[in-house]
Amino acid sequence: MRDTNFPVTASVLFLRRPQVTATAVVTAFVGLTAFLVANELQMHQVPDSFAAISLNLDFVRWALLAGVVAVAELWYCYRHLESNHPPTSADETAEIERYQFLGLPNTVTLARGALFATLAGFAGVTPIYSIAWLPSLLYGTGSALDFIDGSLARTAGRQTVLGAKLDLAFDSLGFLIAPVVAILWGQLPMWYVLLPVTQYLFK
């Protein structure tokens, strides 16, 4: 299917491979957040070798957790790329051709997923009051983008089965990660984790 949302020029030929777009978006968001996390941890280091080692380990744990979740999200996206086409009715027998480009709405959804992946990294970080704004900002931004990707898809007539799959998966993931981080940081009681688990099973 010819995708009219993007002009076919040499400057965007790489976008014909959705894997490239997905990887670039997730890597960019994780990389930017990694810079912020490293900067905040570095700012609050004290001239104590043991404290410095602890903060460095915090960043390593953050990077490992965020990286694992980001890779899992990309794998999920790659696995369902054949669904990058408009929804079809049950009586349609003709095979629907996939879009050539990932599309702006799906790109925004992937950005949401990347934000939730970076949020997951804070499950391995020692709670520090001075960086508590970062997890809040990440989850708040990811939740706000939930309204934008759907609106973009409807406005541009670019609703896809892939977008619906990614949206549901990342909604459930974010709703699970946020309480886990809050529990580990002592902001919520342990039983609160039952809410996202119940919501996921219900969906």
Image (cartoon, grey):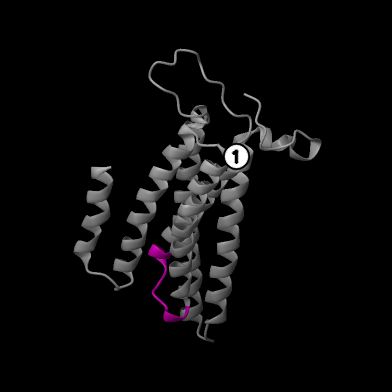
Q: Position of residue 5 (x, y in %)?
A: 66, 37
Q: Is residue 67 visible?
A: no
148, 121: nearer the viewer: 148
54, 160: nearer the viewer: 160
Instruction: Please give the name of the residue rendered at 48% of the width and 74% of the height, measured from the top-left corner.
Output: 55
Considering every residue shown, the one lying at the far right of the view is: 10
Considering every residue shown, the one lying at the far top of the view is: 93
How many callouts does the rendering have? 1
* Residue 163 located left or right of residue 17: left
- Assign the C terminus to one quadrant of the image: top left
Q: Which residue is mark 1?
A: 103
Assign a secondary structure to mark 1.
loop
Q: Quadrant of residue 3?
A: top right
- Assign the N terminus to one quadrant of the image: top right
Instruction: Please give the name of the residue rendered at 69% of the width and 37% of the height, measured from the top-left corner.
Output: 6
Q: Quadrant of residue 47?
A: bottom right
200, 78: nearer the viewer: 200
Query: Does the stretch in magenta take in 127?
Result: yes
Q: Position of residue 175 (x, y in %)?
A: 34, 55
**Start and end of the magenta stretch?**
121-130
**In the depicted structure, whether residue 1 falls above or below residue 131:** above
**In the depicted structure, whether residue 23 falls above or below residue 98:** below
Q: Quadrant of residue 164?
A: top left
Instruction: Please give the name of the residue rendered at 39% of the width and 15% of the height, measured from the top-left corner.
Output: 91
Q: Position of residue 144 (x, y in %)?
A: 47, 59
Query: Does the stretch in magenta take in 147?
Result: no
* Residue 62 located left or right of residue 3: left
Instruction: Please give the name of the residue rendered at 57% of the width and 80% of the height, measured from the top-left corner.
Output: 43
